[in-house]
Amino acid sequence: MRCGVLALQGDWAAHIGALERAGAAARPVRTATELEEIDALVLPGGESTVVLRLLEREGWMERLVERLRNGLPVLATCAGIILLARDVTPEQPSFGLLDIGVRRNAYGRQVSSTIVPVRLSEAFAGPAEMEGVFIRAPRIERVGPGVEVLGWRGDDPALVRQGAIVAATFHPEITGDDRVHRYFLDVAGGTP
Amino acid sequence: MMQFDDPKFRVKVGLAEMLKGGVIMDVTTAEQAKIAEDAGAAAVMALERVPADIRAEGGVARMSPVEKIREIQEAVSIPVMAKCRIGHVAEAKILEALKVDFIDESEVLTPADEENHVNKHPFTVPFVCGCRNLGEALRRIGEGAALIRTKGEAGSGNIVEAVRHLRTVQRQIKTLTILDEHELMAEAKQLQAPFELVRWVAEHGKLPVPNFAAGGVATPADAMLCMMLGAESVFVGSGIFKSSDPAKRASAIVGAVTHWQDPAKVAELSVGLGEAMSGLDIAKLTPEEMLSRRGW
C-alpha cells in the first residue's frame, strides 16, 4: 500500500516516521500528481487555516475531497480532524466528511497545552491508556450516529472512526506509541 | 536526557513541531496580523516596531505594549508570539501572563542583561532563541529553549548572516557526528556548550529541538535558500511589511517554504511581487550596529 502524508505544512515528517515504525512505506504529498499515487493519506498536525489556504491555492482541494469521498482511507490528527469535521466552531470551511462537531483551540492557548492519558476502547490491544499530547487542541463537541469513539480524554471523545476515517484531537505521531498508526493501517488494509 | 523526557518540555517542543514548514511573520497591528493570517502565516510575532524601523529610529526597543498584543490575539486564531528583551525575566513573566503562545527572547530588542539569558525551564510558555553557532544554540536549549532560530541580521533585508549561521550550525553538527566519543568533552569546552547536549547531538546528528531560520529574509528565494540549508521553517520580519505589496509577498514566501524543492514553482510564485524591502550591506555596518552580536 502506498501511504501519503499531506506535506504542505505541519509535523508531516513525524507521521512518516510513525508509519515507517508501524511497517508502512510513506511519502510526502505536495502536488496533484502525488495525490494520485497513494492508497491512503494522513492529514497531519499543523495550523488548519494554513493548510486550508495552501490547499485552496494549489487548485486540487476538490480532487482531494473527491478521493476522500470515494473512500480513500485517511488518518487525521489535530489540525487534520478540523479539516475533516462537518461542523467547526468558530466557523471555518472544512471538507465536512466526518460527522462530528469540533471547537478549535477549545482547551485554550499554548499555556494550556498538555500531555494527559487517553483512555482507549477495546479495539486496541496493550495498555488501556496511551499518551495524549494535546497542543492547542480542538475538542470534539458532537459525535454523529455513524461515528465510533475509540479514545477519550476524560469524558471528551479524542479518537474516533467513521468507515475509513480515523481521527484524533491529539498527536500520536510525536509519542513512541504507534498503535493509532497500526490501527489505521489495518483499517486501510495495508498491513501484511 | 531528562530534559527531553519532561512532559512540560515535550509540550513546548510539540508546538514548535506543528509550526514546521510554515512561516512566522512579524506584525505590529491587528490589521497586519489579519493580512499575515490570510496569506497563510503559521504564526505571527507581535512587536512594537519591525526590526528595520528599530534600526532606523534607534532608542531602546522593548516588549510590545500589552494592548497591542491583546489586539493581535483577538484578531487571529493562529499562534501569537511576542518578544522579550534578552535576560528580561519580568517581560517574559508578563508575556506568559498574557498567554502568548511563544516568547522570542530576542536580540532585536535592546538587551536587559548583558551576561544572562532567562532561565526558561520554569515557564509554561515555550521560548524561541536566536543563535549564530551550535554552542549558542545548545546554551539556549540548556536554559530551556524549545525552538532555535538563526539570528541572521534582523531588519537588514540581507540573507548573508542567516546563511552564515545556518551553515555554521550544520557544519558543527556534522563535525560532532564524526568525532570519537573521547573527543566530545574537549569539543564541548570548545563550543562552550553543555556536555550532555553535545553528546545528544553527536548521537543524533541534529538539534534536539526544531531549527528555524530568521534574520534578513526578503524574497521567496531567500526562504527557499534557508530551507535548502536545513531550516525547518522561516521567520520573516521586516521583509513583508516593508515591501510594496505585503499580502502578495507574504503568500509567495509561504508557498516557497512549502515547495522549496520545486524551483519552477517558486519561480512562478515570485512573479509580480513588486519591490522587496531595500536592504543593507552588512559589511558597512559597525559591530555596534549588528543586532546579532547581542547575547552570547
Image (cartoon, coloured by chain):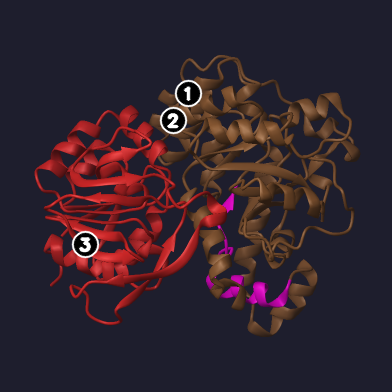
Chain colours: A red, B brown
Mark nearest the camera among 3 and 1 is 3
- On the image, which quarter does residue B202 sit in? bottom right
Q: Which residue is mark 1?
A: B270
Tag on residue A73? none
Mark 1 Cα-neighbour bin, 10 Å: few <14, some 14–19, many ≥20: some
Q: Are marks 3 and 1 in contact (CB under 8 Å)?
A: no
Left or right of A10 in this view: A63:
left
Give the residue at x 56% y 42%.
B234
Tell me, yes or no, if residue B263 can be seen here. yes
Q: Residues within 10 Å of mark 2 (few under 14, many from 20)?
A: many
Q: What subunit carries mark 3?
A: A
Q: Amino acid at mark 3?
A: Val
| Residue placed most toward the observer, B228 or B32 | B32
**Which residue position is annotated with label 3?**
A149
According to the picture, the residue beneath numbered tag 2 turns out to be B266
A96 to the left or right of B212: left
Q: Are marks 1 and 2 in contact (CB under 8 Å)?
A: yes
Q: Is residue B225 or residue A21 the one in the foreground?
A: A21
Residue placed most toward the observer, B35 or B68: B68
The N terminus of chain A: image quadrant: bottom left
SS type, badge 3 = strand
Circle 1 SS class = loop
Q: What x and y, as percent, mark residue A43?
A: 30, 49
